[in-house]
Image (spheres, helix red, strand yellow):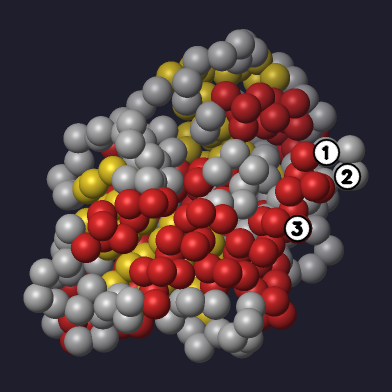
Amino acid sequence: MIQVVPQLKPSRCGVSDHAISLALELRRAYGLNSSIVILNESDKPEIPIPYVNCTPETLEEACHSFVNHSAPSLLVHYSGYGYSQDGAPLAFAQALARLKTSGEFRFGVYFHELYASGMPWTKAFWFSRRQKHVVRMIAQHCDLIVTNLGFHKAWLERNTLNAPPAALRQLPVFSNIGETDEIPSISGREPALVVFGLPGTRRRSYERLRQMSDLLRALGIERIIDIGPEFDVPSAICGVPIGRKGILEKEEIFDILSSSRFGFVSHPSICLAKSGSLAAFAALGVIPVVASTFPAEMDGLTDGVHLISPHSVTAVRQKDLDRISTAIWSWYSLHNLRVHARTYAELLEPAQAAI
């Protein structure tokens, strides 16, 4: 299987880590070897997976460099702004169309993003139409389409030319930090709240947490653990001390999450299923804390059942924490790394999936 990515920066890019984790799992579970095509010529990572750098103009040549006697499949990881500054990589879409027309490849795509939106005075508003056009171009050539959000799936069902696509799946993102088959009890974990990610994400998290003193107190949170690149992290929020850990290896993050009760997610409710932070928490039974409630189920998530918000915290008792931890882990298990790998193995490499 050939995976196409806009860049390959392990530990610094969620899409990169997604592709690498998937490649390793496909090899482990199905004996499927992966190669990676990077749509820029500057990334030179040290990874245990063969890769080649290219441009849209040389994409076909790059993919053919990995073709042997077996029928190849191609999986594109799509995030528009990764491939072009306007988020509408037309040259890339045209290159994919030429590759598909050759008839040599089975073709799949994971839409990490579809298109941006915004007010008329923002660039997102003016770029949105061309971004949608490129998404349609790519989707119409696919044997398999996968995306993370129910909102994305519904849009693709309405707007792709081969609607409904022959194979359209919704799979929220899996954790790049690791997974477990058995979660430890919440009572044995530290009453700490983990905040991790890039500086912009964590800055937004602390802005929201400043307004959530009642929730922090109600959950008995004794400290906040900050993980990620250095920036002006406050020393405390609402009287709760913040311990800075800096940049850690994923094994170290895994250990911290496994021993912590809560994790903060700054994404709005409609985007929770594409949050790498939420996936990392859910995979280890860490209870997600969000800044605002949502009125109904969102991508299988329900406030007070799978996560806690300022609205639901008043109804949560200490004995409910293990129930919520189990519920979010069970939700995640329906789309974990093994499920992602099985989906691609069965639909892009049907002969190999029987191994």
Give the numbered dot on residue 129: 3
Q: Nearer the viewer, mark 2 or mark 3?
A: 3
* Location of residue 45 by image quarter: top left
Disc 3/disc 1 C-alpha distance (Å): 13 Å
For disc 1, the neighbor class at 10 Å (few under 14, some 14 to 19, many from 20) is few
Report if the CB atoms under discs 2 and 1 are less than 8 Å apart.
yes
Report the side of 240 relative to 54 (left or right). Answer: right
Above or below 52: residue 247: above
Q: Nearer the viewer, mark 3 or mark 1?
A: 3
**Badge 1 amino acid:** Thr
> What residue would you read off at disc 1?
122
> What residue would you read off at disc 2?
119
- Residue shown at 33% from the left, 36% from the top: 41
Q: Secondary structure at mark 2?
A: loop
Report the side of 139 relative to 45 (left or right). Answer: right
- Residue shown at 41% from the left, 33% from the top: 12
Disc 2/disc 3 C-alpha distance (Å): 13 Å
- Residue shown at 18% from the left, 58% from the top: 65
* Location of residue 349 by image quarter: bottom left
